[in-house]
Amino acid sequence: MNIAARVGSDEIAVVYVGQYEDGELVEFVEAVQPPMPREEKWVLMLSTLYGCPVACKMCDAGGFYHGKISKERLFKQLDYMVYRHYPDGKIPCRQFKIQFARMGEPTFNREVLEVLKELPQRYDAPGLMPSLSTIAPGGVDGFFDELLEIKNQYYAGGNFQFQFSLHTSDEKLRRELIPVRTWSFAQMQAYGERFYRPGDRKITLNFALAQDVPVSADDLIRYFDPEKFLIKITPLNPTYSAENYGLRSYIDAEAGPQSYAVVDHLEAAGYKVIVSIGETEENRIGSNCGQYVLKHVLAESKLGDGYLYKIEHLVE
């Protein structure tokens, strides 16, 4: 694999555009969390599909879909970033998080499961923490069943992070935001009850929350036990898709820490709520969730608050 282009900064995040031998392009990302050094927390984000068939209304990676990325090519993304910093494969990071979250719904690709099985032996990484976020599509129950077994065998005791991407507590509206067949909340509840074991990390319910999109504790509490599920609310990152659909972020990423009524509402119901605001500079790089640099390259009109870094074109 050659690196066709990259954008960003080692001090924050770098997006790589890799080109495989047959010409296929793929994006992957490495990021740190200032002021913490890389040895404290290092996050790698892999693409699992070529494009994505889902086309969530806030995500620029939707569309362009034409296949699944093989296990070998998934590891090429990882190996490039790992060996760039740690040529001996010894990764001294307290938290070394691998997210299958750059491009593609990971449950559509069973090769992700093979990667999860091999990861603990591939690198010397005591801080390894795989993270899988899913919209919970229908028709891939076998993936979820095997994922549960892999978590218990390889990542027991809190070494795996699992997340349902909900974005709203209104199931009808969720079908508009995520226009494919997905599990109902009742099905997610049933799986979560099987997945969670004492000592595991709580299952995350993620909301990239747009203005005027409901998040009701009354709707959630019927399905998701606060003892087993926590809630993460993030800004809606600047994407072409969000702009096209008129979606605006409920969380003001530029304003810094502040109180939000929805957080108070959810905490009063017993949920642990994390308001996760990363480096806003990542929006300008184009490395945040939902962003896709290749879409920016093809766009005729540009966003004012995202994808502002110059793309460096190269072949290594």
Image (cartoon, grey):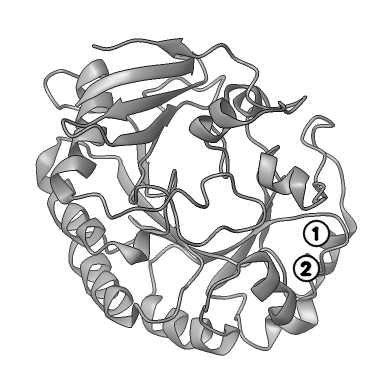
Quarter of the rendering occupied by the N terminus: top left
Q: Position of residue 278 (x, y in %)?
A: 63, 34
Q: Residues within 10 Å of mark 1 (few under 14, many from 20)?
A: some
Q: Residue at x 15, y 35 (%)?
A: 124
Residue identifier under label 2: 266
Q: In this rendering, would 179 be left or right of 242?
A: left
Residue type pointed to by label 2: Leu
Residue 263 - label: 1
Q: Is residue 201 visible?
A: yes
Circles 2 and 1 in contact, beta carbons < 8 Å: yes
Q: Secondary structure at mark 2?
A: helix
**Which quadrant: the C terminus?**
top left
127 or 67, which lies in front?
A: 67
| Lateral position of residue 18 relative to residue 223, left or right | left
Where is residue 104 drawn, in percent x and y? 42, 53
Up-down relation of residue 85 to residue 201 (above or below):
above
Q: Give the amino acid type for the residue marked by disc 1 in the picture.
A: Val
- Say which quarter of the image contains residue 25: top left
In this rendering, position of residue 9 left or right of residue 224: left
